[in-house]
Amino acid sequence: MAGGAATTTQYTTASSGNKASGYLFPFILVTSLFFLWALVHNLSPILIPHLKKACMLTDTQSSFIDSAVFLAYFLLALPAGYVMKRFGFKSGIILGLILYALGRSYSFRRLTQGNIFSS
């Protein structure tokens, strides 16, 4: 086989372009979600003084608002990792969004019961 014909290997990439475009929408969705979460975290220090005035909170109570956000990251990191490992990233993101929406709707409902938004 010393003088045999050289073999060539051909690679086809026709299907890889179609596969890459299938990831474009999820990539945009996850990127925009991270942008929205960062927006909420950056608005929090701006809104806390206004929330302090509207709800008549003390300095200690208003500091609990900011620390509760970061305490949640600390306490839920391992359970979130377990959910991601067991059910996958997509299910973990969906569960996180559902919990986020439930928390926001609960806090908004509590604020409306306190007659803050009513005239």
Image (cartoon, grey):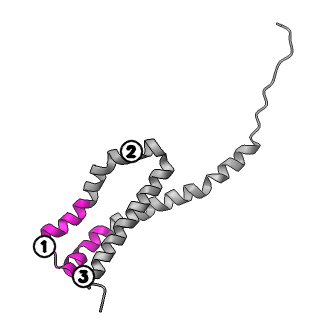
Amino acid at the residue labelled 2: Gly
Q: How many marks?
A: 3
Q: Is residue 50 above or below residue 94?
A: below
Q: CA distance from mark 1 to mark 3?
A: 17 Å
**Residue occupying the far top of the picture:** 2
Q: Which residue is mark 2?
A: 81
For label 3, the SS is loop
Q: Which residue is mark 1?
A: 58
Q: Which mark is residue 114?
A: 3
Q: Earlier in the sequence, mark 2 or mark 3?
A: 2
At horizontal 43% and vertical 56% (from top left) the residue drawn is 95
For label 2, the SS is helix
Q: Is residue 114 above or below residue 96?
A: below
- Front position in the image: 103 or 15: 103
Q: CA distance from mark 2 to mark 1?
A: 35 Å
Q: Position of residue 68 (x, y in %)?
A: 24, 60
Q: Position of residue 86 (x, y in %)?
A: 45, 42
Horizontal side of 15 relative to 78 (left or right) equals: right
State which quarter of the image contains the N terminus: top right
Give yes or no for residue 63 being in the magenta stretch: yes
Q: Is residue 39 visible?
A: no
State which quarter of the image contains the C terminus: bottom left
At horizontal 60% and vertical 58% (from top left) the residue drawn is 25
Q: Position of residue 67 (x, y in %)?
A: 22, 60
| Segment tinted magenta in the rendering | 44-68
- Front position in the image: 33 or 105: 105
